[in-house]
Image: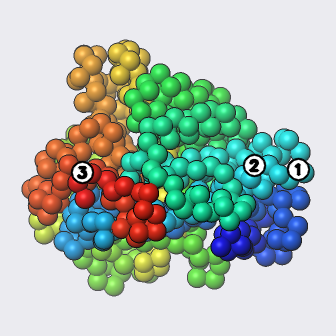
Amino acid sequence: MIKRYLLKVAILAITVLSLSGCEKFLEEDMKHAASPSKFYTTEAEAQAAVNGIYTVLYDIFSNPDFFFAAEGSTDLMVMIVERNVNGNFGYSPAAPGVGQEVWKHSYKGVMYANNTITGIQRSSLSAEIKEKLIAEAVTLRSLYYYILTNTFGDVPYWSAGLKTEDDVNEIIALPRSNADSIRNVLIGELENYAPNLLERAEGDNTGRVTQGLAYGLMAKLALTNRDWEKARWAAEQVVNMAGRGVYKLLEDYGDIYKVENNQESIFEIQYSYSLTGLQRAHQIYNWCMPTPKSGSQYNGVDLGNDSATPYGAVRPTRRLESYYSTGDKRKIHVLASGYMDAVQKVFKNFNMYNSTGRYWLGPKFWDIQANNIASGRNIIFMRYADVVLMMAEALIEQDQLGDAKFYIDLIRNRADIGGIPLTNQPTMREELRKERGRELAGEYSRKWDIVRWGIFYESIKSVAGDYAAAANNVKPYNLYYPIPSLEIVKNPALRQNPGY
């Protein structure tokens, strides 16, 4: 059994790209792949193993159901496909929806990270190389545990490599660990290892985890644990990097999705699609693009040879619509009342709403260049604006309202809607939450935000007019997915989430 685990890691390491040349680090180049019989003897081989940890991100983020769970079943976006259990809260332990895939792939990422860290620690590589590579693996492991704890709450936790049959037997019988305790461990590890990461990933390193992601994850974890001072400190590290020119808020909100890996970006899932080259694609944006479409025509607007297939199944709620004032520069990117002009490639309001007289999701969520259902557009997971708003949130909870206003106003001023009044803590807390909704719509944060704020259930109930199936089905315990029955059969030490 242990041989199968270790063989999987070795095979995965062989199939990922080394860092030589000017290719992106996850493109395949078998000529430079590491040999399993002499693994971890060189930096390139150890880096190839670290690269393997990244590949699991595609298994998670390429799945539309993961997007539906994080964004399409919230108070700001809903699914209109009645049968999708992730959109209408119809999942159960026996039919756990995307929960089964999140569990399986996240723990696969954890296993790859643990085995890679153990292998590098036991290698003869220099201390400097070890520190750099282990920091990268630790950060990725933290990301997988972040996803697991947000999806399920308490989960089994382990951080050791699998070296013997006894190790395997111990791991597959682990009970669930307290999610807050797991997050505290992750925070400590990220704080320890973050300085060993790159400040910014550029050139051949584009797409790698950085100090910005490590500190940003720290802030997210600390906010969930209500550790306001640690969250503020972690966010401040990223703000300080912006002061050194590493990050900045782009002048044009549209450029955050039009320009991949831009200076506001902290971490994106790297995709690429070509009929003749690398094909690592997803179909997330197809579910958001407006319909109907006939050939190259969207309601009479000719988009030329573009062949993207739209589904139009994820829609904004009236609440999201209400968040944007007429002058908010983000509105035309997030909400669509018309279609993209094929010649000028700019958004135009043709006042062609869908059959309900409502908005579609806007071009932030489109890829009209997709080849049918294959989109090569990157998926944004974290950017500097997110960290700025986390900084503001931590300051509000510490009752440092003037400082919090400064950071919220940075985001609002870019949107040309002016600063917020300096009022009291409850009012500014509510404004901060709305601002996260306006700014970060669709960026894999909304459900996890409303869960940690303690307003999940009432938030879903409040949008019954947009999607009655979700509002009717949702139960207070749906803030977490059930532990899949299959996992409990394999490990009786697991206990089901309450309510299921």
From the image, tell me which residue sits under label 2.
133
Q: Which residue in the protein does label 1 denote?
A: 125
Q: Nearer the viewer, residue 385 or 253?
A: 385
In the image, residue 106 lies at what x, y percent?
51, 59
Residue holding disc 3: 477
Residue, x 37% and y 60% (percent of image)?
Answer: 483
Identify the image quadrant of residue 189. top right
Kindly indicate whether the residue at mark 1 contacts the one at mark 2 (C-beta within 8 angstroms). yes
Q: Is residue 246 above or below residue 20?
A: above
- Which residue occupies the foreground of this view, 334 or 400? 400
Camera sees residue 127: yes
Report how many numbered discs are placed on residues in the image: 3
Q: Classify mark 1: residues with Cα within 10 Å, few (<14), some (14-19) or many (20+).
A: some
Cα gap from disc 3 to disc 2, whole angstroms:
39 Å
As displayed, is residue 306 above or below residue 52? Answer: below
Picture coordinates of residue 209, whole percent (x, y)? 63, 48
Check the image and report above or below for 326 versus 469.
above
Which circle, 3 or 1, is nearer the viewer?
3
Looking at marks 2 and 1 on the same chain, the residue that comes earlier in the sequence is marked by 1
Which secondary structure, mark 1? loop
Quarter containing the N terminus: bottom right
Which one is earlier in the sequence, the residue at label 3 or at label 2? 2
The answer to which of marks 3 and 1 sits earlier in the sequence is 1
Residue 194: x, y in percent?
66, 37
Q: CA distance from mark 2 to mark 1?
A: 10 Å
Residue 250 relative to residue 289: left or right: right
The quarter of the image holding the C terminus is bottom left
Which residue shows up at 69% across the image and 56% down it?
Answer: 161
Estimate how packed mark 3 is, as few (under 14), some (14 to 19) or many (20 or more) residues with alpha carbons within 10 Å. Answer: some
